[in-house]
Image (spheres, rainbow, N blue to C red):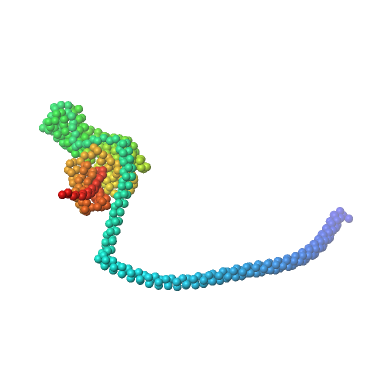
Amino acid sequence: MQLGTIIAIIVGAVIVTALIAWNAAIIYRKRVVEAKIGTAEEKAREIIDEALKVAETKKREGLLELKEESIRTRNELEKEGRERRSEVQRLEKRVLAKEEALDRKTESIEKKESQLASREDRLNKRQAEVEALGAKRQQELERISGLTSEQAKEYLLKTVEDEVKHETALLVKELETRAKEEAAKKAKDYVVTAIQKCAADTVAEATISVVQLPNDEMKGRIIGREGRNIRTIEMMTGVDLIIDDTPEAVILSCFDPIRREVARIALEKLIVDGRIHPARIEEMVEKAQKEVETMIREEGETALLEVGVHGIHPELVRLLGKMKFRTSYGQNALKHSIEVAQLAGILAGEVGEDVRLAKRAGLLHDIGKSVDHEMEGSHIKLGVELCRKYKESNLVINAVEAHHGDVEPTSLIACIVQAADTISAARPGARRETLETYTNRLKELEDITNTFKGVEKSFAIQAGREIRVMVIPEQVSDADMVLLARDIAKQVEAELEYPGQVKVNVIRESRAIEYAK
């Protein structure tokens, strides 16, 4: 045989063998899988049976637990029901007890009402008897006294009124005496302390200034050719030059102190310079005006430093400086303001108020006087407007507005400024008055006093600081004197303006006269 044929036979045999082996393997695997499936089915049936048994067991246990829980709940509900029934029974017993108590109280109240009704009847009967007796007594009293009930009532009221009036006057007198003693003592301590700590000059300002000349020849040079120099000076300054027989002196007359000061400085510069002609006069007047303006600002700053006040608006400082050239009854306005500021600070320190604020209000209280000759309105109104314009505090504005009593003070500092202003104005030598004003005030003081009923005579003494009132004894009793003095003082306060205070002294004199024959 050939080799190829042999190989083919071998290959065919191998293939046949492989096929037989493959089939055998497939059959084996199939049998193995079938065996495993059968085993798994058996195990699954066993697991299901076991699960059914466990579920049945759990079911029975759950039912038992439910039965036990229901039994326990029923027992608790029964217990709670028994407790509630017992509580209801207890409350019912309490309600019944209260009802019984209310019934007893109602019975007691009814008994008391019946007793009160019987008592009221008895009282009504007695009241009727008393009224009858009262009417009978009134008739008897009217018969005995000869007065009707209305006349007796009027007499009784008049008697009570007189007694009350007398007791009121005594009480007023006692309270006033006590208050005056305490207030006078404290006020004297405060005022004396303030005045002792404040030393002030007593310089009276005038409306003229005198310029000294080196010789009488200078008068002719001041007058100039045909009077041109003196006319130029008067026209530029608004001041009248009086050149009379007074040796080596020229008098400057003007009601505006600032203009008078400008003229005085300009004239002194011209005298020192020696060249006096219209052009030079104009130049010197301009220099003098600048110098006075500088002086005004420096005076305002000096016043602030002297008083110890800071933070005031520069325009208010300039207006303070202008007050150096203003006077009131001969008293320099700037010196008066400084004095009031110092007194207000001392008084504020004594009563425990803000010293700096009191000084500030005292320094600015008359600031309106620096512009009252340029603008319309009183110095109080102008001062309030200036303080508001330059953002001063409401307390300072009220002190400025109230220092003459135009409005009510809203703070103790405003009252302190009033007192300090009065002290500064009323101290001896501070101000001067014209004779006419002085005599008119005395006459008005006596006229006011003489208008009161029962006044016989009145005398204003001690420069108008005391009024002595002589009353008619038959018309004014001792008790009426106290009320009369008070009424006179109130009317004087309302109708008169005066520095300091006025003492009202009421005098009642009784005399008994008999003649031996």
On the image, which quarter does residue 190 sit in?
top left
- Most distant residue in the left direction: 226
Determine if residue 364 is in view: no
Instruction: State the residue in front, 433 or 170.
Output: 170
- In the image: residue 419, left or right of residue 474: right
- Most distant residue in the front direction: 517
Determine if residue 105 is in view: yes
Please tell me which residue is depicted at 32% across the width and 68% down the height of the picture. Answer: 134
Q: Residue 365's spot in the image, x, y percent?
A: 29, 43
Please tell me which residue is depicted at 29% across the width and 47% down the height of the picture. Answer: 402
On the image, which quarter does residue 8 sit in?
bottom right
Please tell me which residue is depicted at 74% across the width and 66% down the height of the picture. Answer: 57
Instruction: State the residue in front, 319 or 112.
Output: 112
- In the image: residue 127, left or right of residue 217: right
Instruction: State the residue in front, 206 or 156.
Output: 156
Please tell me which residue is depicted at 26% across the width and 61% down the height of the picture. Answer: 155
Q: Residue 260's spot in the image, x, y percent?
A: 20, 36
Rendered view: 89 above or below 235: below
